[in-house]
Amino acid sequence: MPTGVGAVSLRVKDLARSGEFYGELLGLESADGQTFAAPGGGVPLVKLIESPRAAPRPPRALGLYHFALLVPERPSLARILRRLMKGGWHLQGASDHEVSEALYLADPDGYGIEIYRDRPRDEWRYTNGQLVMSTLPLNIEGLLSEAADEGPLPKETIMGHIHLHVSSLSAAEDFYSGRLGFDVTVRGYPGALFLSAGRYHHHIGLNTWAGPHATRPRPDQIGMEEFEIYADGSATPVRLKDPDGNTVVVRER
C-alpha cells in the first residue's frame, strides 16, 4: 500500500543556476550539486538533471503542475517566507486551503513549487465524508508575525505531495487509486481530484486545468523526469508509466 511521496527528478537548463536556487535561497543541502535534501541529514527532495540544450516546456503541458515541500509548523513557513522576501524572489501566490497554508513560487526553469504547513488534523472539516478544501487568501501579516527572522527550510522538511496536469481525471484515478492504491479524498474541487494514503488531505493532486489540447513534455524539453512514491513491501524499486507518460518510481521508504 502507498505511504507517501518522495523525491522529484527535474531536467534543468543550468545546474549551477538551479543549485543556487535550491541551495542558497531555499537552504537545501547537496553533496554532489544534483541531489538536494533537507539540511542536517534530511531526506532527498529534489534531483536535478542538467540538459543545457533542452527546449522550453510548452505553456500548456501535461505532467508536473507543482511539487510541494511540507514544513513542520507555522513559524518555519514564516521564516522561509521572510527568506524569499529578503532574496527578492517573486511569489506566484499565497493561499489558505483550510487544511493547510501555502506559498507558491517557481524555480529558475519555471517548475511550480508549493511550500506549506498543515493545520492540525482535528481542525480539518468533512462534509458527507469528503474533506473540505478551499482556496482562500492567506493572511500574510499574520503568518509573518510568527517569526521575526528569516531562515532556510528546516531539517524536518519532507515532500508533502505532487500535483499533476492530466488529460483525464478518470484515467488518472484508475491508475493512482485503482492500481497504486491511493484513496480519493476530495472530488468536489472544480477540474481536480485529490488522493492520499493514511487519510492525509492529499499526496497526489490531479487536474485538467491545462485544457483539452495540453501536450506531453518530450524528453528533449524542460520537464519532470520522474517522481517517487513510497509503498510498503517495495524493496526493489519499480518504474511505472501513468496514463500521461509520467514515470513513477515505487520504492520502500
Image (spheres, helix red, strand yellow):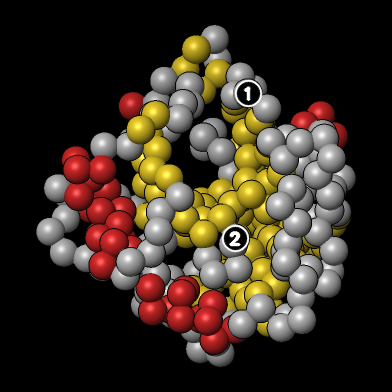
Near mark 1 (Cα within 10 A), the count class, few <14, some 14-19 or many ≥20, is: few
The residue shown at (54%, 70%) is 108
Q: Position of residue 168 (x, y in %)?
A: 82, 34
Q: Quadrant of residue 13?
A: bottom right
Identify which amino acid the numbered label 1 is placed on. Pro
Q: Which mark is residue 129?
A: none
Q: Quadrant of residue 50?
A: bottom right
The residue shown at (38%, 73%) is 25
| Secondary structure of the residue carrying numbered label 2 | loop
Q: Which mark is residue 190?
A: 1
Identify which amino acid the numbered label 2 is placed on. Tyr
Q: Position of residue 210 (x, y in %)?
A: 72, 40
Q: Position of residue 237 (x, y in %)?
A: 77, 66
Residue located farthest toward the bottom when viewing the structure as drawn: 32
**Residue nearest the observer in this picture, 248 or 190:** 190
Marks 1,2: beta carbons within 8 A? no
**Residue nearest the observer in this picture, 91 or 76:** 91
The residue shown at (68%, 46%) is 164
Give the vertical position of 11 relative to 174 (above or below): below
* Quarter of the C terminus within the rendering: bottom right
Give the spatial CA distance, label 1 vs label 2: 23 Å
- From this viewpoint, is residue 163 visible? yes
Give the vertical position of 86 relative to 63 (above or below): below
Q: Position of residue 169 (x, y in %)?
A: 77, 32
Relative horizontal placement of residue 148, taking residue 3 as reference (left or right): left
Relative horizontal placement of residue 152, taking residue 251 as reference (left or right): left
| Secondary structure of the residue carrying numbered label 1 | loop
Please name the residue that numbered disc 2 is placed on.
Answer: 111
Relative horizontal placement of residue 214, taking residue 143 as reference (left or right): right
Give the vertical position of 92 relative to 151 (above or below): above
